[in-house]
Amino acid sequence: MSGLLHLGPAPTRPDPALWRDLRDVPSSVLADVTRDVRAAGHPLAMVAPRAPFIGPAVTVEAGSLAQWRALESVQPGDVLVIASDGRRDCAEFGAVFAAIAQARGVAAIITDGLLRDRAEIAELSMPVLAAGSHPASPFDPSPGRVNLPVMLLGLTVRPGDLVAGDADGIVVIPVESLGKLADRLPAQKAKEAALQKAIADGQMPDALIAGLARIPVQPAP
């Protein structure tokens, strides 16, 4: 059975001190700080509303065996990223898998595929994002990959990359971009706060209005 798996090395997880404070930053703010941060939304959706999360990625691609093997290597705080390769004829996992992942301290599970046992998964405290649901058993005998780069909704996710998410979707933060993100984030947060205050005070900033006015408009027929 081991021949069905392509295993990469254990991910190098960045020091939590470098990213712990990002947990409460909305994905929309992180996505606007630098183009190094890549984002994905629809069709990803949380099974049930949960608090924002962030953690280093443990990546899985194809193969039911690969998903279970990945559970052997997770550490508390990891985010399981399961790429489906576009499969839509079965679920990628169900409630048993998700419950074990939660028990092992996984911060979240993300798949661009489908899941089953939605009602049971919705009762877990762990955030779970998927593209939809399907009742068929998550069986796939094809070769699987664990802790190797995967493609998820057009994003390359590498083992150890930071993945953050909330109700809007997810962002992928390359480890080598953490320094740039940390340097630029205060300015972005200040900009967002100033805009929100101006709106709350009933004073839409002139610069924003002028910028919106320059957006091309298609005349109505």
Image: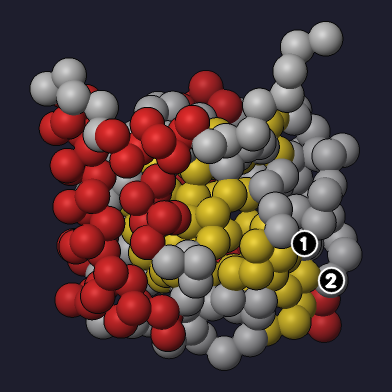
- The residue nearer to you, when weighing 206 against 130, is 206
Residue 127 appears at what percent x and percent y?
41, 42
What residue appears at the point 37 percent right and 61 percent down from the top-left corner? 33
What residue appears at the point 17 percent right and 19 percent down from the top-left corner? 202
> Which corner quadrant holds the N terminus?
bottom right
User: Is the Cβ of the residue at disc 2 closer than 8 Å to that at disc 1?
Assistant: yes
What residue appears at the point 54 percent right and 61 percent down from the top-left corner? 38
209 to the left or right of 73: left
* Quadrant of res 3: bottom right
What residue appears at the point 14 percent right and 32 percent down from the top-left corner? 197
Residue position marked by numbered label 2 in the rendering: 143
Tell me the kind of residue under disc 1: Ala
Residue 83 appears at what percent x and percent y?
70, 58
Q: Of the numbered discs in the image, which one, if any, rests on residue 62? A: 1
- The residue nearer to you, when weighing 158 against 66, is 158
Q: Secondary structure at mark 2?
A: loop
Q: Secondary structure at mark 1?
A: loop
